[in-house]
Amino acid sequence: MVSETTSTTNSSFDDKKGMAIALEQAQISYNEGGIPIGGCLIHKDGRVLGRGYNKRVQNGSPILHGEMSVLENAGRLPHSIYKDCTMYTTLSPCNMCTGAILLYGIKRVVMGENDTFVGGEELLKQNGVELVNLQDEGCKEILTKFIQEKPECWNEDIGV
């Protein structure tokens, strides 16, 4: 488990504001009947380059997790941009999303929580990615509610 921290390394953007955007995206997914995981990609200068949410249910997609949706919505970016960004996500990134974070060289990940699921955190840390866990109650609440309502859909999302 990653300990709670308020680090703002390589970022002039407030982490709580970034998480608010991510949680707003999670709520959009939930309102559409989807899995409530959201995120955003924010450059160190404060520009929001992309935002998105899990669209596996809505699009019938096996890969559109929250972080993947964020990256798709950010569009093609040079490596020099990704390395100066923070990925905000309402939940600990799964192995697939961890791989995308590593592939594009994103050096900082701020997650809302990891009580309901722990993804590739160790792999991220082993590769020098700074992890910040806000242990956000709003992130926990929306996902816990979804898991209680649709456990089979949740299990499918995490590969169980």
Image: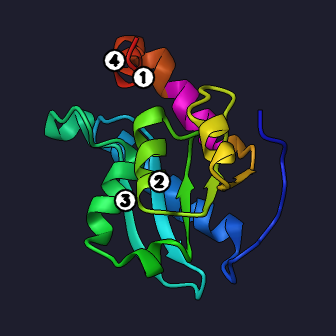
Q: Nearer the viewer, residue 155 or 140?
A: 155
Alpha carbon distance from label 4 to label 1 = 6 Å
Question: Is residue 142 found inside the magenta-colored segment of the image?
Answer: yes
Task: Say what secondary structure mark 3 lies in.
Answer: helix
The answer to whether the residues at label 4 and label 1 have Cβ atoms under 8 Å apart is yes
Q: Nearer the viewer, residue 137 or 82?
A: 82
Sequence order check: which comes first, mark 3 or mark 4? 3
Q: Position of residue 109 (x, y in %)?
A: 61, 56
Residue type highlighted by circle 4: Glu
Q: Position of residue 58 (x, y in %)?
A: 20, 39
Alpha carbon distance from label 3 to label 1 = 18 Å
Residue bearing the label numbered 2:
101
Alpha carbon distance from label 3 to label 4 = 20 Å
Q: Is residue 159 left or right of residue 95?
A: left
Sequence order check: which comes first, mark 2 or mark 1? 2
Residue bearing the label numbered 1:
158
Alpha carbon distance from label 2 to label 3 = 11 Å
Residue type highlighted by circle 1: Ile
**For discs 2 and 3, the disc positioned in front in the rendered view:** 2
- Label 3 crowd (10 A; few <14 / some 14-19 / many >=20): many
Residue at point 40% right, 15% down? 155
Image: magenta residue range:
138-145
Residue bearing the label numbered 4:
156
